[in-house]
Amino acid sequence: MTKYYQPEIECASREEILALQNERLVKQVQHVWDNVPYYRKKMEEKGLTPADIQSVDDLHKLPFLTKDDLRECSPYGLLAKPLKDCVRIPSTSGTTGKRVVAFYTQHDIDLWEECCARAIMAVGGTNEDVCHVSYGYGLFTGGPGLNGGSHKVGCLTLPMSSGNTDRQLQFMCDLGSTILCCTPSYAAYLGETAIEKGIQDQLKLKAGIFGAEAWTEEMRRDIEKKLGLKAYDIYGLTEISGPGVSFECEEQTGMHINEDHFIAEIINPETGEVLPEGEKGELVFTSITKEAFPLLRYRTRDICVLSRKKCSCGRTHVKMSKPMGRSDDMLIIKGVNVFPSQIETVLLEQGFPPNYQIIVDRVNNTDTFDINVEMPPEMFSDTVRDVTAKEKELVAALKAMLGIVAKVHLMAPKSIQRSEGKAVRVIDKRKMY
């Protein structure tokens, strides 16, 4: 472990954590004021100076940052260190608009990798494990983050990246991979392929660290059954640092946020009002140790709940729930709020695999709502009458969950393109007009 690693901080008292956050927040606000004119102007518009921020209690006074701000300032407008001090640039996937780049100093990378190391250790990882990293590398933060965290734990690290599934499984079997890191959709595909090849009994996986896209508890159980491991959630954003902002422990009742590096708030997404612990709202993060790209009060658009309920693992850092949807990519179809996670829940409950696509369009000023759903192999071989009956059951279950009728199209197994990065679940053609 590097000198930055402080395992004791994960079990610190609330008073100790607050004292550390207060100290780091004051320094960070001054750092941003001195080096980021764009944010300094936002503070001045609210009549603020760094002297107005003396503790976490003053955090609510600061203006928010959003992805629109990042796009407006791209690439260098929010940079807080000279470019010569920066050593790496990651980028968002660009699935919701223009790609956003961030920046890291070497110090930023060290701290980020420590956060990822904590996530690996939280699932039981040690220097005796073989950590199989199938997140994408390159500009995507998943691969480099878990790769660096694995090194710090001392695992034998397989930097597989994504794709070439046959080779992934061969390495997994030959080298005895024990921890798998990838997107949940790719984990499900690896499981499907392992079953098809009849090599499930050759896998030695004990834990999986899955993130970068939304997934349900039903999908967790499905992956665990296919791969014979325990599946853990990890959370992060490229803009903040990538995976490792928070992670699940063995209790799996939420993800511990690394509060020595990030301050979390829950706000009302409509009014911006800070909500008390336990209430559902939009997650907001403030980075208090980032040097190159320190975002203050960044609106993630993820909807979740924070809890400080005592955890059996001994960690004292606040937990965030699995995101329950997003405030910006929630679909409004025929006036009804629809989250893809609701659809996934119904599919898995009805015995369908989590491979689907939602297609929304507008015809004659009326929304259309179609869902392409892959059939499991055993259903594909059923009679047309049996398949039709199952389709009707699925349509009824979706209506009961969503309150509106979706037109369901049952597809052959593996007919929907598999994702090696983030799964593309929604095609909203209304945005193209």
Image (cartoon, rainbow, N blue to C red):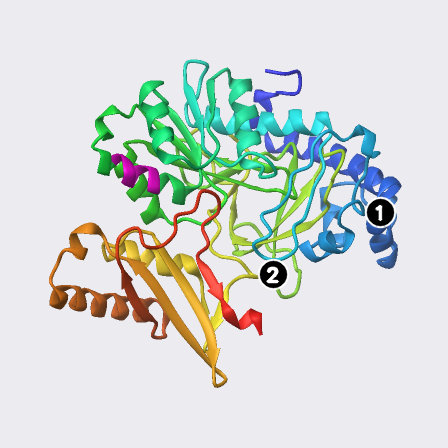
How much space separates mark 1 and mark 2, taking CA atoms? 23 Å
Report the residue at 12% width, 58% height from top.
382
Q: Is 310 positioned to the left or the right of 372 in the image?
A: right
Amino acid type at mark 2: Asn
Position of 364 relative to 26 (above/below)? below
Residue 15: image location, x then y, percent: 64, 32
Amino acid type at mark 1: Asp
Q: Which residue is mark 2?
A: 268
Q: Is 215 positioned to the left or the right of 61 in the image?
A: left
Q: Nearer the viewer, residue 110 or 188?
A: 188
Span highlighted in magenta in the image: 189-194
Q: Nearer the viewer, residue 75 or 275?
A: 75
Residue 116 makes an appearance in the image: yes
Position of 19 relative to 414 (above/below)? above
The image quadrant where one finds the C terminus is bottom right
Residue 65: image location, x then y, percent: 72, 53
Position of 49 relative to 318 (above/below)? below
Q: Nearer the viewer, mark 1 or mark 2?
A: 2
What kind of secondary structure does the magenta stretch mostly adopt?
Answer: helix
Residue 153: image location, x then y, percent: 51, 18
Residue 191 in magenta stretch: yes
